[in-house]
Image: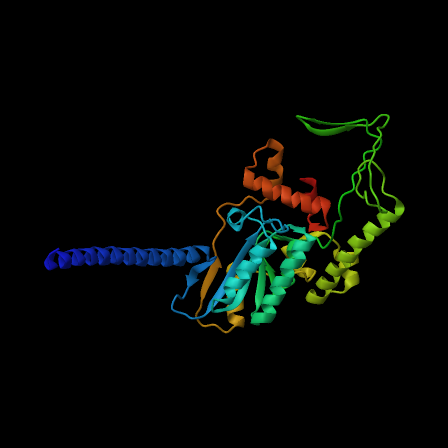
Amino acid sequence: MPKYVTNYTMKTFFGAFFRVLGAFFALIFLIVIFATASSYFSENDKLAFSYLKGDQNSSDSIGLININGPIISEPGNLYNFDLFSSLEVIYPSLIDGYLKELKTKNVKGVVVSINSPGGSVSATHAIYAKFVNFKKQTNLPIYFHSSEILASGGYWISLSGDKIFANYGSLIGSIGVKGPDWIYFNSPTSLSTGPFGNYVESPEGIELYSNTAGKSKDIFNPFRKPNSEEIFKLQQMVDDIYEDFINLVSSKRKIEKNIIKSEIGAMIYNSNKAKDNFLIDNENNINQTINFLSKKLDLDSFNIITNKKNKFNIFNLNTLLNKINNKSLNFNQKIIKDKFCNNIINGFSSALISSYNKC
């Protein structure tokens, strides 16, 4: 074969090879650039806090956390954050995410705008602890503010802050605890479900066979009465949690325990009476609360960053928990309603009694 033919063939081969190789590396480069950009925008989309108002040129910020709704235990692996981020509900990992992000911001203080009737005791205690730990780690002041309702578990959470404020007319209080329900059907003959709900017939009684081992293993069995020992022990557990709640209110609000128990009780109060009872520091709206904190911090100029507003408000005791009666709850709303009701019926809860009546 002539030499020039061989050289031409080799040049053609290597030329094609390097063109393909160049195209390959160019494609890889574009993929890396696209992935990096996608990751960047994806991470930004996940950020909860953004500028709300104030001096954008200031390096000092106040973080405003908006949380509303019933307090429930963790949604679990079945439900992801994206599902619940559009709903107004409060749970520990939601708060954990907010506080972790605020640690990365140059905030000088935090205002928590909260409206809640309470809910699960365990979730309430976990959220309270998260705010306390955040304060210890950052040494930042935290002020709580409510524009509508701050009751029971919601009030418990607010005790983690330095001060508590509320709008005029807000409902504050309900310092109490409820244990699991034990509903006893006295000699039922049948359990029926109809268009008007569940009902029980019990003229003569039915027989129930249940295989259990261990004393009180069948606790909350609806077909037998609780004995006196079980009632006593269940009440003890409720009293223990109530005592913790009382001790916390007494310590944080500087109120004598006997006054909390005998005079304040588990009543709810309007903002004026709540102030008289030392449950809140003053009647302030949210802007007054933020300004009060800025003066405490001696900030001449600052801006406010806040978490994204929820897309819609599903929580209202007279809407969310009533909607189930006319079957108008959508899937996401029903998840929250079921979770909330399960917490307050089958566990220890700190929520307004009207919440129980809706489940």
Residue 96 visible (yes or no)? yes
Please name whichever residue, 305 or 339, is drawn nearer the observer in this view of the structure: 339
- Relative to residue 184, is residue 79 drawn left or right? left
Q: In which quadrant will I find the C terminus?
A: top right
Q: Is residue 279 above or below residue 316?
A: below
In depth, the one of 351 and 171 nearer the eye is 351
Q: Answer with the quarter of the image where residue 329 lies.
A: top right
Q: Is residue 176 left or right of residue 4?
A: right
**Residue at x 11% of width, y 59% of height:** 3
Total tally of numbered discs in the picture:
0
Residue 305 position in % (x across, y down): 46, 61
Q: Position of residue 147 (x, y in %)?
A: 57, 54
Horizontal side, residue 288 vs residue 352: left or right: left
Q: Is residue 167 above or below residue 342?
A: below
Quadrant holding the N terminus: bottom left
Identity of the residue furthest to the bottom in this view: 298
Which is more toward the observer, 46 or 177?
Answer: 46
- Tell me where residue 94 appears, x and y as whole percent: 56, 55
Colour logic: rainbow
Residue at 76% x, 65% y is 256
Residue 161 seen from this side: no
Image quarter of residue 219: top right
Residue 138 % position (x, y): 56, 71
